[in-house]
Amino acid sequence: MAWLRSKLLGIVAVLVLVYLFVPIAVVAVLSFNDPEGKFNISWNEFSLSAWGNLCGVAGVCQSFILSIEIALIATLIATVFGTMIALALVRYRFRGRGAANSLIFLPMATPEVVLGASLLALYLNLRLPLGFWTILIAHIMFTISFIVVAVKARLQGMDPRLEEAAQDLYASPWQTFRFVTFPLVLPGILGAALLGFALSFDDFIISNFASGTTVTFPIFIWGAAQRGIPVQVYALATLVFALALVGTVVGQIVSSRRRRKLAASS
């Protein structure tokens, strides 16, 4: 019993990770499957046909590239504005600051179906044609809140005396931001940008309301699920997960090496 109590936290952590990664492993395995029928839900035989012809199904690559384009543009714009909002909320005192802090959480707390329906009503009242731009506007709107919260957490954990020291050394406000604030906040900004990209890329509910006839990758999967998801979708999903995993591992290695260098220099 003593051994079990000492190892209980580790055992629970392993079980949770297995629970999270089993569905991903199933998708990865089925991406190498050659199904008998149109439904790829059981193993038949090993095949690399889907990996060798990722665009073999009409619309799959077009929707995938479209989702990446929207996610990249939405992430870039939301990260720029979200970082500026976070800086204003943390570093400055102004009238309405408390209300702004509260309003930032509204898109995060609002159910996506409510947010999507509200945006659709707004677009119809403004007579905006539904498509690429309406999806992009919607994605920028709901990802900004997450980016603001993530960057705010980084700023609040930063020692303000570092900026004060730079000002004492006659650094201008721009020099202080460029050489002190920005490098320290950059990891938080990059993390927030990755979060925003992931939220935008896999969003279905809001995109479905704002898309019109435009088909993003999640909308394509939803439509294909009714007649059998092609194996190429499994392959693309596995590819995205593999790239994300490699990026995470590389980031951890770089961060670990940087910490060791700082420890050695001190």
Image (spheres, helix red, strand yellow):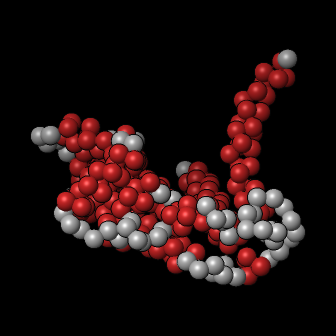
Residue occupying image coordinates x 74% and y 44%: 18
**Residue that extends furthest to the right in the rendered view of this protein:** 45
Residue at position x 42%, y 71% from top? Answer: 214
Image vertical order of residue 39 relative to residue 152, above or below: below
Q: Position of residue 239 (x, y in %)?
A: 66, 69
In this rendering, position of residue 29 left or right of residue 131: right
Regarding residue 40, the answer to whether it shows in the image is yes
Residue 160 drawn at (x, y percent): 31, 44
Residue furthest left in the image: 95
Residue at image point 26% right, 37% down: 102
Nearer-the-camera pick, 110 or 147: 110
Q: How many marks?
A: 0
Locate residue 141 relative to residue 174 in the image: left or right: right
Name the spot of residue 95 as percent of width and height, x first. 11, 40
Residue 229 location (% of width, % of height): 66, 65
Residue at the far top in the pictured view: 1
For the point 79% across and 62% down, which residue is it?
29
Q: Nearer the viewer, residue 180 or 128?
A: 128
* Position of the N terminus by quadrant: top right
Residue 191 in view here: no
Identify which residue, 234 or 182, lies in the foreground: 234
Q: Identify whether 130 is placed above or below 264.
A: below
206 relative to 212, above or below: above
Q: Foreground residue, 195 or 35?
A: 35
Is residue 186 placed above or below 148 in the rendered structure? below
In the drawing, does residue 152 fall left or right of residue 62?
Answer: left
Q: Is residue 247 left or right of residue 29?
A: left
